[in-house]
Image: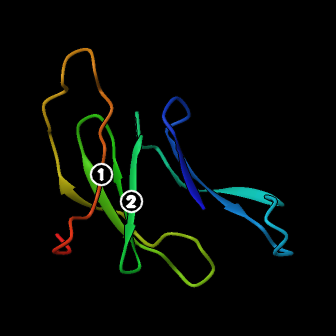
Amino acid sequence: IYVTRREENDVLALTDDDGDGVMDDYRSVAEGLPYVNGITVHEGQIYLATDTDVYRAPILENGDLGPLDVLIADLPDAGQHPNRTLAVGPDGG
């Protein structure tokens, strides 16, 4: 499971090493993403949104993330609501 931490500017991977449905550990898999909050996974890629940018990275076999590619830069800051929600539509786009 991946979670974003907006104030810490990072993304964590939560792991359940023994398969009992309880988190055993976590680690940072992406850092330096100011206000990262939007997140979705599609076809082996993770998509992350900050208040002004959207990124994509491959999810590696061990759960780490490959290099982040900037898909969209310089989104309007949305004034008082910097949160971004990401989703993949039924057509895969």
**Which mark, residue 40?**
2
Residue 85 vs residue 22: left or right? left
- Classify mark 2: helix, strand or loop: strand
Q: Relative to residue 86, is residue 18 depicted above or below? A: below
Q: Residue furthest bottom?
A: 61
Which residue appears farthest toward the front when viewing the image? 90
Q: Do the residues labelled 2 and 1 touch (CB within 8 Å)?
A: yes
User: Looking at the image, which is closer to me, 78 or 27?
Assistant: 78
Q: Which residue is drawn at 40% across and 53% down?
A: 39
Q: Distance between the Cα atoms at labels 2 and 1? A: 6 Å
Looking at the image, residue 42 lies above or below residue 23: below
Is 43 displayed left or right of 18 in the figure?
left
Residue type, mark 1 in image: Leu
From the top left corner, tell me how far across and down residue 6 is, in percent. Answer: 48, 34
Q: Position of residue 46 (x, y in %)?
A: 40, 66
Earlier residue among tags 2 and 1: 2
Q: Residue 86 shows which numbered tag?
A: 1
Which quarter of the image is occupied by the N terminus?
bottom right
Looking at the image, which residue is at 21% across and 65% down? 89
Name the residue: 55% across, 50% down: 3
